[in-house]
């Protein structure tokens, strides 16, 4: 049984992760600014702003794995990178794994190619994608060598706007985007969460980025 803290556990991705983590038998705590609209039985819900240093320390304390599933918007629009870096350092100091939920823009169209976020993207996604990209580069280049981190990116067609159906399968890739035979890149919320929880239960990705898609 693993003690998992999910930051942003009431959002779309976070809510799916806490659901799957509880189903897998883990001890799960969610931190978010708001109470859940549909609480998952067995999850401990805490509220507070991660802008607050005391809340950050409390969130990481006693966790074996910290999953950061927040978005660089709202109150975190200008402080996201600093908050995540401080959370990473807290996780390192406590010996916890640090998992970051990234975006499709952080992936590459081919091995060695520039990341999608470096090219043309819809303007409504650019800032968030590049913020997450900078965080990934910080993890690669500057995170403490002792920090066991992973950065996981979903397929292109992913999110509350396209929840999809739980199919019970998925593929794992590296930092290159995965597409099916028809050229589609998609993953449902529950199947993405299952992949994240599987990585928590049986760690295979250390200090690296990986992707999840059908």
Image (tube, rainbow, N blue to C red):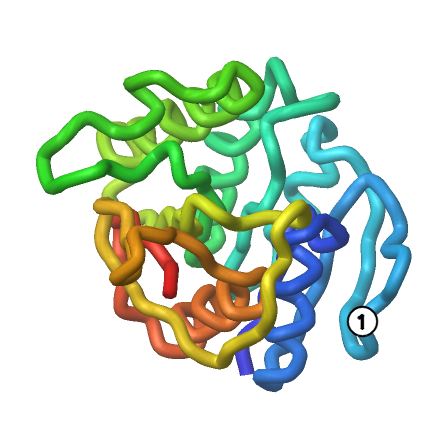
Residue 199 picture location, percent across and down: 39, 69
Residue 145 picture location, percent across and down: 24, 43
Figure quadrant of residue 204: bottom left
Q: Could you tell me which residue is drawn at 67 percent across and 49 percent down?
A: 160
Residue 141 can be seen in this image: yes
In what element is the residue under mark 1? loop
Q: Is residue 38 left or right of residue 157?
A: right
Residue 93 can be seen in this image: no
10 Å crowding of disc 1: few (<14), some (14-19), many (20+): some
Q: Residue furthest front?
A: 182
Q: Is residue 171 left or right of residue 153?
A: left
Q: Could you tell me which residue is drawn at 73 percent across and 36 percent down?
A: 54
Q: Is residue 120 left or right of residue 98?
A: left
Frontmost residue, 65 versus 204: 204
Frontmost residue, 107 versus 34: 107
Residue at numbered disc 1? 40
> Compared to 122, does 212 lie above or below?
below
Figure quadrant of residue 55: top right
Figure quadrant of residue 1: bottom right
């Amino acid at each position: 049984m693993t003690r998992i803290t999910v930051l942003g556990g009431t959002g779309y991705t976070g809510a799916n992760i806490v659901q799957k983590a509880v189903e897998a038998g883990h001890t799960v705590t969610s931190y978010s600014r708001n109470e859940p609209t549909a609480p998952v039985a067995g999850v401990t819900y805490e509220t507070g702003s991660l802008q607050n240093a005391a809340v950050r320390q409390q969130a990481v304390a006693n966790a074996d794995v910290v999953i950061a599933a927040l978005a660089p918007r709202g109150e975190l629009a200008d402080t996201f990178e600093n908050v995540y870096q401080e959370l990473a350092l807290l996780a390192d100091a406590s010996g916890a794994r640090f998992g970051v939920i990234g975006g499709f823009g952080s992936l590459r169209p081919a091995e060695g190619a520039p990341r999608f976020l470096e090219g043309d993207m819809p303007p409504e996604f650019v800032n968030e994608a590049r913020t997450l990209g900078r965080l990934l580069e910080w993890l690669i280049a500057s995170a403490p060598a002792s920090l066991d981190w992973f950065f996981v990116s979903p397929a292109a067609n992913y999110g509350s706007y396209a929840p999809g159906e739980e199919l019970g399968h998925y593929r794992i890739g590296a930092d290159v985007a995965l597409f099916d035979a028809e050229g589609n890149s998609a993953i449902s919320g529950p199947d993405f969460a299952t992949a994240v929880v599987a990585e928590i239960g049986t760690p295979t990705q250390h200090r690296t980025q990986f992707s999840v898609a059908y």
